[in-house]
């Protein structure tokens, strides 16, 4: 194997690894909160394409052009990796912000459930619309949401997207159940008010 063949194999292997990293970031593209975030991903895609074009040209280069073409590949690879690092950092920041927002929502709902539990303890069992089964369901849902949120912090790429979808489905179910409980509580409170 010639030095050129060895170099090509090394560069192609590194490029496959970088492309896989890019695809992992790309899998989280729906987190993009603005055009800048999408531009970071689009820019990474363009740099990836540049590297692939340079590699193709290097494969076709004759001995005289080899060094010049090799420099072109190295520059394209360096630009792609720098951009990929920036995009990775940006997406990690978006993931952290998403998780923090969901933690705050979970804490808020948990506090609301604590208020319901306190209200239930004050009221008699006959007067309370919040049955033990409803409270148990909500508590289990909160615990499950916390576990899903923890899973979210350890997942990456497609696994992160799946974990996020599971978390959001659980969250929607919790919110729907809490809305129904609040609506039932508001209706009862309104009908019990003195006229």
Image (tube, helix red, strand yellow):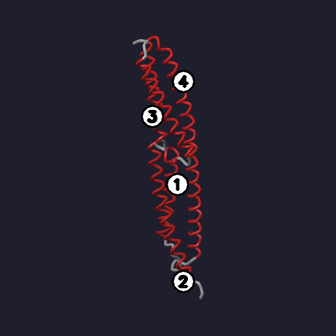
Say which residue appears at 47% left-offset and 41% top-offset: 26
Residue at the spot of label 4: 75
* Whole-number angstrom distance, CA of label 2 to CA of label 4: 74 Å
Q: Position of residue 135 (x, y in %)?
A: 50, 67
* Whole-number angstrom distance, CA of label 1 to CA of label 2: 36 Å
Residue at the spot of label 2: 191
* Whole-number angstrom distance, CA of label 2 to CA of label 3: 61 Å
Whichever of labels 1 and 2 marks the residue nearer the N terminus, that label is: 1
Residue at the spot of label 1: 146
Image position of 118 with respect to 149: above or below: below
- In the structure shown, which secondary structural element does the residue marked by tag 3 occupy? helix
Whichever of labels 2 and 4 marks the residue nearer the N terminus, that label is: 4
Mark 1 or 2: in front is 2
Whichever of labels 1 and 3 marks the residue nearer the N terminus, that label is: 3
* Whole-number angstrom distance, CA of label 3 to CA of label 4: 20 Å
Quick check: marks 1 and 4 in contact, CB under 8 Å? Answer: no
Q: Position of residue 12 (x, y in %)?
A: 43, 24
87 and 96: which is toward the camera: 87
């Amino acid at each position: 194997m010639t030095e050129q063949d060895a170099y090509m194999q090394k560069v192609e292997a590194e490029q496959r690894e970088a492309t896989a990293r890019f695809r992992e970031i790309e899998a989280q593209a729906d987190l993009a909160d603005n055009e800048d975030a999408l531009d970071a991903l689009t820019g990474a895609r363009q740099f990836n394409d540049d590297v692939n074009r340079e590699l193709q040209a290097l494969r076709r280069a004759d001995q005289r052009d080899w060094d010049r073409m090799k420099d072109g590949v190295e520059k394209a690879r360096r630009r792609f990796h720098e951009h990929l690092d920036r995009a990775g950092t940006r997406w990690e920041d978006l993931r952290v912000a998403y998780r923090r927002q969901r933690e705050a929502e979970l804490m808020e709902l948990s506090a609301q459930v604590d208020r319901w539990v306190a209200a239930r303890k004050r009221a008699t069992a006959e007067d309370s619309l919040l049955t033990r089964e409803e409270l148990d369901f909500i508590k289990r849902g909160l615990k499950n949401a916390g576990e899903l949120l923890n899973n979210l912090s350890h997942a990456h790429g497609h696994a992160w997207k799946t974990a996020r979808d599971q978390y959001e489905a659980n969250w929607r179910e919790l919110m729907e159940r809490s809305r129904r409980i609040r609506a039932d509580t508001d209706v009862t409170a309104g009908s019990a008010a003195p006229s």
